Image (cartoon, rainbow, N blue to C red):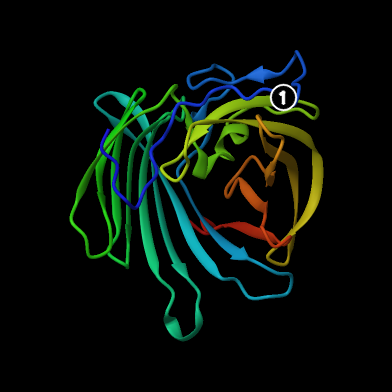
């Protein structure tokens, strides 16, 4: 296994003793399970903004564009994310991320991220094999070759998992996730709550609350507020080490098309 210095290898996850008990009627969602179908998402364009404190200006913004297509007869989703850090005096870095998923199963197929700092990461996922090339700022390209213990959803878009399902209050769903920034694949638990009225960029939106936790430890990953239309995720809140909350808002940009 060849691993560049800028990344940590994906390791096989060994079940952790003492993990929080999961109800017997939980839906255990492996990649390819019939309960999740990403084909419900039409092509659309949405914008996200990141806030680190109430009443403070956003620190980051990006757009998510979904293109629905075909690859050698296989229906696929092509996600294009373009982002910028909103630092003072225009010093924020920019990045662009292109991802391809199997349209039905949401199995990651390709991943290509580039940044204004010169870093890039290009990956292909063949089942449990992840391989590609990483480039550090100012460095030389380095090959990467990883083996996952199981197919998994992309952790950086874990909110797609409940959004691709028919949800009902009280449901519990588990699903494996991974990303290049994680040490191992990890099982997440999604707790489905009721509908709530939330304020999103000055407008009230009725959205379903979904709480995501780490299966092994019970640690809170995020609280999602999701709808059945673009932008689908209208609020995502993740805890910060300093006790604060990172809040991401989502708004639709397809109006008028």
Residue 157 in the image: above or below residue 126: below
Residue at position x 55%, y 16% in the image: 34
**Residue ID at (72%, 35%):** 218
Q: What residue sits 57% from the left and 63% below the top?
A: 49
Position of residue 13 measured from the top left corner of the image (x, y, whole percent): 51, 26
Looking at the image, residue 254 sits to the left or right of residue 207; the answer is left
Report the residue at 50% width, 83% height from top.
88
Give the side of residue 205 with respect to residue 183, left or right: right
Task: Using the rendered view, name the quadrant where residue 102 is placed.
Answer: top left
Q: Secondary structure at mark 1?
A: loop
Q: In this rendered view, identify the residue nearer to me: 255 or 194.
A: 194
- Which one is nearer the viewer's eye here, 251 or 90? 90
Tell me: 137 left or right of 231.
left
Q: Quadrant of the N terminus?
A: top left
- Label 1 packing within 10 angstroms: few (<14), some (14-19), many (20+): few
- Give the labeled residue for mark 1: 18
User: Is 229 placed above or below 92 here?
Assistant: above
Percent across and percent down for residue 92 are 44, 74
Between 49 and 137, the one lying in front of the other is: 137
Task: Please give left or right for residue 244 compared with residue 63 in the image.
Answer: right
Farthest residue in the left direction?
A: 140
Which image quadrant is residue 117 in? bottom left
- The total of numbered circles placed on residues is 1
Q: Give the percent coordinates (x, y) of residue 97.
A: 37, 52
Quarter of the image where one finds residue 174? top right
The residue most toward the top is 24
x and y percentages locating residue 185 in the rendered image: 49, 31
């Amino acid at each position: 296994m060849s691993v560049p210095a800028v990344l940590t290898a994906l390791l096989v996850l060994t079940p952790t003793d003492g993990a929080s008990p999961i109800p017997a009627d939980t839906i255990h969602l492996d990649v390819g399970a019939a309960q999740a179908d990403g084909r419900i998402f039409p092509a659309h364009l949405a914008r996200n903004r990141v806030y680190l404190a109430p009443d403070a200006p956003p620190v980051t913004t990006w757009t998510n564009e979904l293109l629905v297509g075909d690859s050698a007869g296989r229906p696929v989703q092509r996600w294009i994310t373009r982002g910028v850090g909103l630092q003072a005096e225009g010093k924020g870095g920019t990045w662009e991320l292109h991802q391809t998923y199997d349209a039905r199963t949401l199995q990651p197929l390709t991943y290509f991220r580039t940044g204004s700092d010169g870093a890039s990461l290009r990956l292909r996922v063949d089942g449990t094999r992840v391989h590609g090339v990483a480039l550090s700022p100012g460095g030389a390209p380095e090959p990467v070759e990883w083996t996952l213990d199981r197919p998994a959803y992309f952790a950086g878009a874990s909110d797609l998992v409940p959004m691709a399902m028919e949800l009902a209050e009280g449901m519990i769903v588990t699903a494996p996730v991974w990303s290049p920034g994680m040490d191992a694949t990890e099982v997440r638990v999604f707790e489905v709550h009721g509908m709530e009225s939330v304020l999103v960029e000055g407008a009230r939106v009725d959205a379903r609350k979904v709480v995501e936790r780490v299966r092994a430890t019970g640690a809170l990953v995020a609280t999602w507020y999701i709808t059945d239309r673009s932008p689908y995720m209208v609020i995502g809140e993740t805890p910060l080490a300093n006790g604060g909350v990172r809040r991401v808002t989502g708004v639709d940009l397809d109006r008028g098309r």
